[in-house]
Amino acid sequence: MTSAVLDTLNPQFIYDAVRKVGTGRAKDQAGGDWTIEFLSRDEADRMNIAVTGPDGARRELTVSEEDFLFSDNTVGIRGLDGFRGFMHPVYLKKMRGFTRGNIPTPDIAGTSLP
Amino acid sequence: MKDTKGELLKSYFVPNGSYLMELAEDGSDASQVKVLQAIGKAIQEDLKADAIIIASPHWLPKSGFFVDCGSIHESFHDYVLRPAPYGRRFYTHVLPGAPELARALIAAGQAEGLPVKEKTYGMDHGAFCPLKVMGTRLPTVPISISQRSHEECVRWGKAIRHAVEQSGLRVVLVAPGNLSHRLDLRNEQAGGEYFAEGRDFDRQVCDLVEAGRSRDLASLIDPALWKAAAPEANLCNLSLIAGASGDAPGKTLQYQGAIFSVGDATFAFDTLSV
């Protein structure tokens, strides 16, 4: 399971300003690793995301912020039935902010923001 | 809302880098920190403001402008944490909200014909870092800027001022940001000697802001230089202030040159009659 200790050496949400992509990492109840990549945002603030599960299967879908179901330390996504990912609250809130229009200070800096 | 007429007392463009919180915590006498602390003191003791509107340069939706109408606002962390290179310490901040003023901003923006809506957001570091260093505890309304046009950001500023003047409240607008903003060229050296385009860009922006030309920045500065400097939030924060302040000239309170590869300036704006 995801540790409750804030491990800043292994951030669970990062922003790559070169690719303009945000990436979240979560664990499911069985300890499986999930990756949520935010690939692009359209003019209506709908986001094209790619979700990769523990089996390596990658699924792309278009979602809005309302499709993210956040609790204190978990995230679910409408359209991905049964997915419930655990994240540290600090990084979960960072990812939630990203779904609501935040552009973080980049972990990988590019020539421009956002 | 009060029956008396409200007033936009001042607008400020201030730096928002997370390093400012570390400098303040460590008791630094860096001018960026000292000026922020002086602004906080002035807002509370001299201007006697009732509320602050804070427009983070990191809240950049595309579909419109957003306002957080919450009665309390918690920070969330959106910068790189130590021990990464240029990572910073973890900070939090909580401030009371001003829901009635927030709703008035939405109504004024919509009356202006802008896509303005409510959204629960909280405060990213672009909002809470300068407010934390300022030390203000006033009711605060977090608002977004946007990736929309400078012209719409000017109109958003006008709408904000209109709402404030109808509110009966004494309000300060803070729109943080940096001038040149090339985080890929990070360098501890102050003065920007390693980044000639950034230094040139910052100088032009400072001159135009002081001349009351904030709304014209994007049309007056060479596009190639603009692209090389990559200013934070595309300087829509200064467009917002231009609209709110009635194109007031900015007074430069401090300019550090490029430090950590960002142009670190602080401007204060009075509110002109329109």
Image: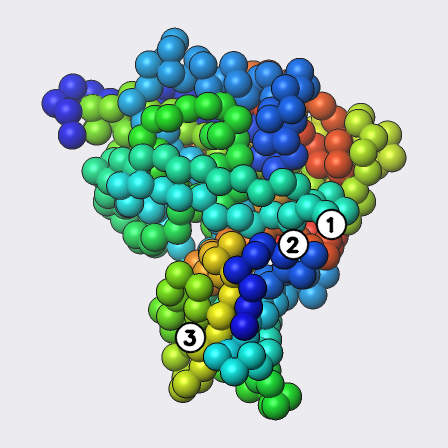
Q: Nearer the viewer, residue B225 or A17?
A: A17
The residue drawn where x is 40% and y is 37% is B94
Instruction: Name the side, left or right, on which B92 lies relative to B80.
Output: left
The residue drawn where x is 70% and y is 57% is A9
Quarter of the picture containing the N terminus of chain B is top left
Q: Which mark is residue A8?
A: 2
Task: Evaluate if marks 2 and 3 touch, with contact meaning CB atoms under 8 Å apart.
Answer: no
The residue drawn where x is 42% and y is 75% is A76
Q: Nearer the viewer, residue B218 or A3?
A: A3
Q: Which residue is mark 3?
A: A76
- The residue carrying pointer 1 sits among few (fewer than 14), some (14 to 19) or many (20 or more) residues within 10 Å by Cα, namely few
B101 w.r.t. A43: above or below: above
The residue drawn where x is 49% and y is 30% is B132
Task: Specify whether residue B177 is in view.
Answer: yes
Separation of disc 2 and disc 3 at Cα? 23 Å
Task: Evaluate if marks 1 and 2 touch, with contact meaning CB atoms under 8 Å apart.
Answer: yes
Tell me which amino acid carries mark 2.
Thr
Q: Nearer the viewer, mark 1 or mark 2?
A: 2
Q: Nearer the viewer, mark 2 or mark 3?
A: 2
Quarter of the picture containing the C terminus of chain B is top left
Q: Which residue is mark 1?
A: B84
Separation of disc 1 and disc 2 at Cα? 8 Å
Q: Nearer the viewer, residue B144 or A58?
A: A58
> Where is residue B176 shown, x and y percent of the image?
53, 34
Instruction: Name the side, left or right, on which B37 lies relative to B243.
Output: right
Classify mark 1: helix, strand or loop. Answer: loop
> Where is residue A25 shown, x and y percent of the image?
59, 70
- The residue carrying pointer 3 sits among few (fewer than 14), some (14 to 19) or many (20 or more) residues within 10 Å by Cα, namely some
Separation of disc 1 and disc 3 at Cα? 29 Å
Disc 1 with disc 3 on a shared chain: no
Task: Specify whether residue B158 is in view.
Answer: no
Tell me which amino acid carries mark 1.
Ala
